[in-house]
Amino acid sequence: MSRTYKILMAGAAALALASCGSAEVASPGEGGFGGGGSGGGGGGGGGGGAAADCPTGFDNVGVINNLRNCQLPAKVVGNLVVPQRAGTIYSLGGRTDVGDDQGSNPAAPIAGAQDGTLTIEAGVTIFGSSGADFIVVNRGSQIFAEGTATAPIVMTSRQSIEGTTGEDSIGQWGGLVILGRAPIAACPGGVTPPNIACEAQVEGTSAFYGGNTPADNSGRLRYFRIQHSGFEVLPGNELNGITLAGVGSGTTMEYIQVHNSSDDGIEPFGGTVNLRYVVLTGNDDDSFDTDTGYRGAVQFMIVRQRANGGDRMFESSGAGDNALFTRPVISNVTAIGRPNGGDALLLNTGHAMQLYNSVVTGSAACLDIDDDESVNNGPAFNSVHFSCPIAFRDDSNVTGAQAAAIFNAGANNTANGTSTLNGFVNGTNENGVDFTPVNSVRAFLQDVDYIGAVRDSSDTWWQGWTCGLESGSDC
């Protein structure tokens, strides 16, 4: 059948199996796959054998690792459900678009453009085989990928399914791109943001993003994991693990992991989307890169670089019109860098990060502010514990002393601390830092009485659906 399949009713995608193994898919646990895969690198196949066929709307492209390989269409129009069922795994055969780009104005969508909804059931695994395999959710369309703690949704590489990935396996397929109509700072000449006419082409694809709908809703992602992704389309133009471009605050993103992206883990380009319970591990460039007027909030984030890869943990840029400079509010981060990577936090081109209740350790330097524009826009730090050999990078643009003055102007900060983390769980020194209430800063944020991403060893929000955080847990 054609790879472009129009689904008009969600129920059609749940066609019953005529013949397949009766064994249920075991709970994947930490590091495991849904959709019939085993744990770790995905080397195990379905215990009941490959399903006999594929659901309606998918191409049957054979069997991989004893699982029926069902390929997503090139375009999703209407509602396509990716059902979790025994003996079945799903794949990408190039770029999959969810809907057409409907433009920046929801009240006047582009004539003839069609919307799409991609619904992925808990426990489903989808894989790509090359950098040309990626998903684009266009403006006006949505993705609903809601796993559970014991049955996360996993997007990964073919090598991962075949069990051949290792600690440094990166860039083996494209990634996920979500495009929305929220405000951005990248505008055509003569247009000042926020403005419905502010729209731009997103990095890594030919698609467009932006508008002036702050509460734009691109769907829901929960208990969702991406592994071994990222691809350089052109020099300096890459697909990230997850690209969020102009995504609005009506979108739900929580319990999200990106592991071993060859570029950034997550990169918001503008927009207002909020994130909660985020794990970024092993990403080769920046773990969390914010740009072009991003104004969302983030809370409870674990960042850990791998020994052989990782530049900065936070690259924070304000590219675009300074009328809408980048200013995220971020709280309760535990960021563990590597000594031979980049500086932990880089602020440049007018970025004004607001960082609260966080722990930063392991990098060569904790904070580098690159330019006067960033200084003037007012970055702020409160209840932040630094423990790096160099607290503040001294360079020719903004001196270490200037960065120190900004940091020390906040409350309850520690510039030259000693890490007592047990893995990513607070120790004595981290627990000794007074917390700062944040709900009054941004209503999305919760007031908690500790700094860092994890309160103590009994705080297990990250367990079950992530991989690579605990000894013996592989991705």
Image: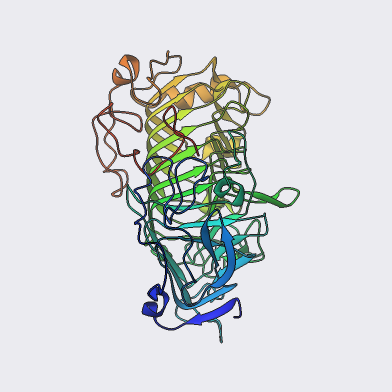
352 on left or right of 431: right
> In terms of depth relative to the viewer, which is nearer, 304 or 82?
82
On screen, 307 above or below 290? above
Percent position of residue 358, x then y: 38, 30
Question: How many discs mark residues in the rendered view?
Answer: 0
Q: Residue at x 43, y 54 (%)?
A: 36
Q: State how the image is colored.
A: rainbow
Q: Is residue 69 visible?
A: yes
Determine whether, in the image, residue 17 is placed left or right of residue 338: left
Picture quadrant of residue 313: top right
Q: Nearer the viewer, residue 159 or 318?
A: 159
Residue 87: image quadrant is: bottom left
Q: Residue furthest bottom?
A: 112
Q: Position of residue 27 (x, y in %)?
A: 34, 48
Q: Is residue 317 above or below residue 108?
A: above
On screen, 37 above or below 207?
A: above
The residue lying at 37 percent from left, 20 percent from top is 422
**Observer able to see residue 101:** no
Which image quadrant: the N terminus?
A: bottom right
User: Which quadrant holds residue 216?
Assistant: bottom left
Q: Residue 74: x, y in percent? A: 60, 72
Q: Position of residue 6 (x, y in %)?
A: 51, 82
Compared with 186, 80 (above or below) is below
**Residue drawn 67% across the image and 54% down it:** 131
Q: Residue at x 54, y 39 (%)?
A: 287
Residue lying farthest to the right in this orientation: 235
